Image (cartoon, helix red, strand yellow):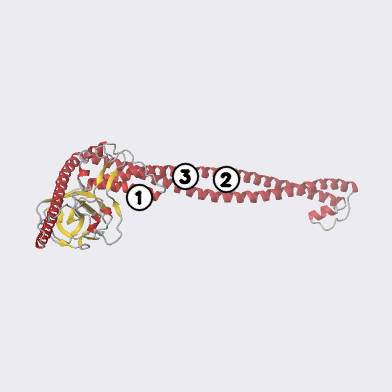
Amino acid sequence: MNSTSSGGTGAVTTPRRGGRWQARMGGTLASLVLVGMLGLVPAAHADNLDDQAAALRQQADDAASALEFVDAGIAKSASDLVMYQGQLPGAQAALADAQNRVGAATELVNSLAARIGLAQQSKDKITAQIALEAKKSAETKSMIGQLAAQSYKAGGLPPNLALILGVGNSGDLADSIDLAGQAMRSQNAALERLTTEKATNQNAQARLVAVEAEIKDLKTQADAALVAEQAARDQAAAKKAAVDKLISDSAAINAKLEAQKPQIQAKIKVVQQQQDNVAAKIAERQRQEIEAARKAAAAEAARQAELARQKAAEQGNNNFVPPPYVPPAPGNPSAFGLAHPFAGNIPITSGFGWRQTPPGTIDFNGTGGYMHTGVDFGATCGTPVYAAAAGTVVIAGWTNGGGGNTVQITHGVIQGNALMTIYYHNSSVQVAAGQQVSRGQLIAYSGSTGNSTGCHAHFETWLNGSPVDPMTLL
């Protein structure tokens, strides 16, 4: 906002923002704290997360820029509050999504556990069935053995029973034919049961292998699901902690700003008065420069007119009357040939013009925004700063109004226009007040001095007593 310096020209107050902004500063604090600081900043309407993050960062930068020259700590608090409140809806959505994933993971774990239980029940039934069939087969084989013994006593075994029991010869038919016939009938029935039992047992064994494979696969899936569930729970816990911290931090900052209300009111009042003085001094300086240029032009026109009259008189034309002098209309300000104050492609973090602040934050006494009378460049500390045009250094050094190390250069009057450029927050200044500088000459190194929340460079151009967008002149 404003700065005060005694850099070679006496006490001079230099501007952060111009008269159009200062008129809106009076009620900043009331709107800053009382217009719902804890109301959430609407989520940025952007197509992707990168755009949303950039838009939110811009809102935070604008909030900091609005109060930067009043107090760096307060400016950072305002910026942080905008950032925290802007991040909260996304954090809450991420928490809800994480909680949904926990629910889905838990449901999968429970489903797999139920399937494992059913498969285990099936395995138990098959195992019991195999055991029962094995018992039946043993009983049948025992009965067949008894029949074989009876048949042997009766005169030998039939070929099929001998084959099944592994007996090579039927032996001598010592017993009666009737006993052999009875044994034949019993053995046939037993053989049929044994064949059925064997097939049933083989089928059960196959089903047992299949269900054991299913149980193994389900347990593998369940183990993975348990790991995923725990990861989802851990992530949800982290998201919950992030949401809680955003809410806690926002409340703490809001309380801090509320407590600083008297301090902010007092500083804004001082800054506003400084701006009024600075704007008036710049306007008066440039008025005088323009007036001096006009007088010089009029004097030169009068001199040329007198020379023309004398020449006409020498030629015998004593009636010659030079035309009256008419001051020319102001020309194009581009005639100053301003160069960019940085050699590299330094990004703009806050441009010139009206800043619409998000509802619920800095409302600027009901106006909804403020006038940013310069351009903030995201220059890292130590970036060389060059004079945008040739001129005379008015201020060079530390200023007390928040601008830190400041350079102010007047570029005189060209085609009826007076121009001044101002460079704030420099880490060091390489020129002195009263020094003549050329276009592109090194004048400072960027920094974060004064009431600044971080390394950057604030650049202003004042044309005929008013701030104008530097980007229209570069």
- Real-space CA distance between mark 3 and mark 1, rounded to the nearest whole angstrom: 28 Å
- Real-space CA distance between mark 2 and mark 1, rounded to the nearest whole angstrom: 49 Å
> Would you place residue 8 above or below residue 80 in this image?
below
Quarter of the view holding residue 19 = top left
Query: What residue is shown with label 1?
Result: 54
Tell me if mark 3 has few (under 14), some (14-19) or many (20+) residues whose alpha carbon lies within 10 angstroms of its own: some
Quarter holding the C terminus is: bottom left
Nearest the viewer among 218 and 425 is 425
- Residue 339's x, y, as percent? 25, 59
Indicate which disc, 2 or 1, sits on the residue closer to the N terminus.
1
Nearest the viewer among 120 and 15 is 15
Three-letter amino acid code of the residue under disc 2: Ile
- Real-space CA distance between mark 2 and mark 3, rounded to the nearest whole angstrom: 22 Å
> Would you place residue 389 above or below residue 245 in this image?
below
Query: What residue is shown with label 2?
Result: 116
- Residue 154's x, y, as percent? 87, 50
Outermost residue, right side: 177
- Residue 213's x, y, as percent? 61, 51
- Local secondary structure at mark 3: helix
Query: What residue is shown with label 3?
Result: 101
Residue 200 visible, this angle: yes
Three-letter amino acid code of the residue under disc 3: Arg
Give the residue at x 62% y 46%. Answer: 123
